[in-house]
């Protein structure tokens, strides 16, 4: 799976790709106009290369898919939510360092 | 070259930006420097460890002397903050707090560092649940709601005006407002409710922000609080250009020995690239950035 890169998800496939997935997933809620979102994108890619076998790394454009972020009461981007068995395991707001995010995903390994 | 176009634009006029201006303008390219002397970390400092100055020297004096030096090499100073950056067709576009647009072939980021957190009760707890540090990112989540913007400088003032396009009611909490007259006028003629006699004491809410408690005891019922202290910094002005930040803290801009960022034509110098926060480092990096940016601009102007 690692060669797949960060998966784009949307309101239409969020349930099948994330909530019903057989693996935990880290979803980056972002938008193209958001600077901090841009800063964190390469960190997601790096983590995907390391942990992509056991965790799904995905991103959801809040501009094109407003329903999913509303469902999780997202009011700031980037917000990164860790899902396990269809439920929110944890979440982090803002552009955080890689080490921080790495410790975060290790919680569901 | 039109008045609002230059070869090298420098954002910041602390020691890093000033030294960059001196060295870039020394290479006979057109240089414009943005920013305010009194917002430099050096402005209130008394310096004893800067090489070749044996006596304690005031930071303010150093900043004034540096400006005269840079002007003697024909650098132009614009005493405004930059509130927006863009890159298009090998040029950078910078928008000032007065809404003026400048174009540059190369840009040097020398904005220093500034405090971004309010450090009040509720701020950390309600982050992402009504507390935001980025109007540009999050305004859209507050359509039809009431919000407060907190801050005394261009980021807060410009942010409040932006939010008028989204929110129902916008408060600006700004007891020590320092912005240009033009921006001031825009604010006064807008629907922004300006609060000048109090600061934020606490952000209140359960699962989401419900109100802001002010130092004079007043309570503003709001759904969101935008903390926009100071002028826009690295994350606000550089991240959207695709700049890479340091892996460890995600606060500083990564550069190589030529002070180049990962974006061609974009350089950084001074406190903004990380510790040590010292004048000597800022001017050293500024010198290199100024020369390299001038070289880059000349090369691109020819092509
Ligand atoms: C109290 C104090 C004492 C100090 N004492 C010493 C000392 O003794 N020796 C020493 O070596 N160092 C000292 N320092 C540190 C030193 O002042 C800094 O390392 C130095 O000023 C960094 O220079 P700079 O050019 O990177 O940034 P700064 O000097 O902080 O300048 C930043 C500039 O960027 C501008 N700016 C910011 N945002 C924007 C924007 N959006 N648009 C336009 N302009 C913008 C500001 O207006 C300002 O002009 C001291 C600092 C403090 C606070």
Image (cartoon, coloured by chain):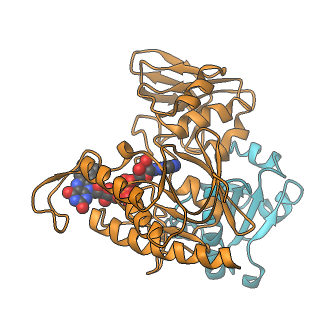
Image quadrant, ligand 1: bottom left
Rendered position, B203 above or below A76: above
**Chain painted in orange in the figure:** B
Q: Nearer the viewer, residue B181 or B267?
A: B181
Q: Position of residue B277 (x, y in %)?
A: 31, 62
Rendered shade, chain A: cyan
Q: Is residue A80 left or right of residue B32?
A: right
* Front residue of this view, candidates B23 and B114: B23
x 66%, y 76%: residue = B300
Q: Residue furthest bottom?
A: A3
Q: Which quarter of the image is occupied by the N terminus of chain B?
A: bottom right
Q: Is residue B16 left or right of residue B278?
A: right
Q: Where residue B250 sits: x, y (%)?
A: 49, 64
Residue A54 seen by the camera: no
The image quadrant where one finds the C terminus of chain B is: bottom right
Of B148 and B74, which appears nearest the observer?
A: B74
**Lateral position of residue B289 relative to residue B193, left or right:** left
Residue most toward the right? A12
Q: Residue at x 47, y 79 (%)?
A: B256
Give the residue drawn at x 42%, y 18%.
B197
């Amino acid at each position: 799976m690692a060669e797949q890169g960060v998966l784009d998800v949307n309101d239409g496939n969020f349930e099948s790709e994330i909530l019903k997935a057989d693996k935990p997933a880290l979803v980056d809620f972002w938008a193209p106009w958001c600077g901090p979102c841009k800063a964190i994108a390469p960190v997601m890619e790096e983590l995907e290369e390391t942990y992509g076998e056991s965790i799904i790394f995905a991103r959801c454009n809040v501009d094109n898919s407003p329903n999913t972020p509303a469902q999780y009461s997202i009011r700031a981007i980037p917000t990164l939510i860790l899902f396990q068995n269809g439920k929110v395991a944890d979440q982090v707001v803002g552009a955080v360092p890689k080490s921080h995010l790495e410790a975060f995903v290790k919680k569901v390994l | 070259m039109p008045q609002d176009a230059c070869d090298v634009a420098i954002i910041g006029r602390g020691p890093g930006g000033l030294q960059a201006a001196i060295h870039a303008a020394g290479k006979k390219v057109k240089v414009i420097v943005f920013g305010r002397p009194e917002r430099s970390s050096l402005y209130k400092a008394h310096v004893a460890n800067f090489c070749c100055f044996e006596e304690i020297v005031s930071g303010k004096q150093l900043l004034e002397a540096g400006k005269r030096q840079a002007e003697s090499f024909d650098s132009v100073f614009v005493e405004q903050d930059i509130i927006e950056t863009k890159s298009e067709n090998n040029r950078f576009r910078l928008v000032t707090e007065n809404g003026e647009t400048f174009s540059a072939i190369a840009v040097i980021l020398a904005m220093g560092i500034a405090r971004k957190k309010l450090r009040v009760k509720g701020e950390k707890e309600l982050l992402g649940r009504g507390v935001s540090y980025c109007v540009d990112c999050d305004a859209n989540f507050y359509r039809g709601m009431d919000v407060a913007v907190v801050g005394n400088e261009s980021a807060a003032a410009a942010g409040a005006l932006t939010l008028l396009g989204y929110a129902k009611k916008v408060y600006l909490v700004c007891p020590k407002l320092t912005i240009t007259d033009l921006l001031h006028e825009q604010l006064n003629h807008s629907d922004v409710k300006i609060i000048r006699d109090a600061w934020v004491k606490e952000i209140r809410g359960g699962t989401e922000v419900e109100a802001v408690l002010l130092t004079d005891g007043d309570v503003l019922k709001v759904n969101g609080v935008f903390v926009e202290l100071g002028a826009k910094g690295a994350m606000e002005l550089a991240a959207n250009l695709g700049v890479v930040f340091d892996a460890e803290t995600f606060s500083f801009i990564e550069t190589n020995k030529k002070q180049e960022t990962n974006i061609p034509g974009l350089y950084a110098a001074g406190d903004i690239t990380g510790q040590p926060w010292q004048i000597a480092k800022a001017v050293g990096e500024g010198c290199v950035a100024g020369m390299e940016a001038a070289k880059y601009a000349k090369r691109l102007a020819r092509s």
